[in-house]
């Protein structure tokens, strides 16, 4: 944590210096990048991977059993962010009680009393689902996640271009062998 404060302090000092004829050069180290980039798999993971063989060298069935066709992923995924403004505390309490009862029943599947309680909660949920307010939805916006990892909310990027460029450069630095 102390290192990130030093990095931020250095950035503040550099940004407050008067402009000169020489361009300002900022050096970002591997340690700085490890603070900025969340996770990269170890470099040897892909080098040691062998299809059809487990970690101990034993043969395993391939992941594409039964001649399954590969799925072609789209360039982006988009999903709505919705709220249910008229969702009452009664519905939220019922949902919570139902989750608790279902968890207890999973631990004790032969308990007739728990099964009856869960059935009663399901019946009450069905009754509440029939009310008009249970169907209200308010779409707040849409989130789009591109294949390259950029995320947008209603078409606006959630990360500025400079931060994205720094993140990409750090991924390259961390992927390179340490000197």
Image (cartoon, rainbow, N blue to C red):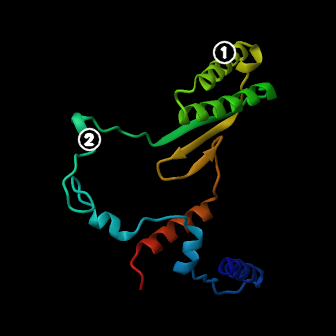
Left or right for 178, reference 149: left
* Local secondary structure at mark 2: loop
Q: Quadrant of residue 165?
A: bottom right
Q: CA distance from mark 1 to mark 2?
A: 41 Å
**Disc on res. 154:** none
The front one of 122 and 51 is 122
Residue 72 percent coordinates (x, y)? 36, 39
Q: Quadrant of the C terminus?
A: bottom left
Q: How dense is the environment of label 2, judged by Cα within 10 Å: few (below 14), some, or many (20 and up)?
A: few
Q: How dense is the environment of label 1, judged by Cα within 10 Å: few (below 14), some, or many (20 and up)?
A: few
Q: Residue at x 22, y 34 (%)?
A: 66
Q: Earlier in the sequence, mark 1 or mark 2?
A: 2
**48 w.r.t. 118: above or below:** below
**Residue under pointer 1:** 123
Q: Residue at x 73, y 17 (%)?
A: 128
Q: Quadrant of residue 108?
A: top right
Residue 155 percent coordinates (x, y)? 63, 43
**Residue under pointer 2:** 64
**63 w.r.t. 67: above or below:** below
The front one of 98 and 140 is 98
Front label number (1 vs 2): 1
Q: Residue at x 57, y 31 (%)?
A: 105
Left or right for 95, reference 57: right
Residue 20 percent coordinates (x, y)? 71, 86
**31 w.r.t. 167: above or below:** below
* Local secondary structure at mark 1: helix
């Amino acid at each position: 944590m102390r290192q990130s404060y030093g990095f931020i302090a250095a950035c503040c000092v550099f940004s407050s210096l008067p402009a000169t004829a020489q361009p300002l050069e900022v050096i970002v180290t591997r340690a700085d990048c490890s603070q900025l980039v969340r996770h990269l798999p170890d470099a040897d993971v892909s080098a040691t991977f062998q299809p059809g063989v487990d970690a101990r060298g034993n043969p395993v069935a391939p992941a594409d059993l039964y001649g399954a066709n590969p799925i072609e992923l789209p360039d982006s995924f988009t999903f709505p962010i919705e709220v249910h403004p008229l969702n009452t505390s009664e519905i939220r309490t019922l949902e919570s009680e139902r989750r608790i009862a279902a968890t207890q029943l999973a631990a004790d599947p032969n308990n007739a009393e728990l099964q009856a309680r869960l059935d009663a909660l399901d019946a009450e949920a069905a009754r509440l689902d029939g009310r008009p307010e249970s169907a209200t939805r308010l779409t707040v916006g849409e989130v789009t996640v591109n294949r390259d990892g950029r995320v947008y909310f209603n078409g606006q990027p959630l990360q500025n271009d400079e931060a994205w460029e720094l993140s990409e450069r750090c991924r390259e630095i961390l992927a390179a062998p340490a000197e």
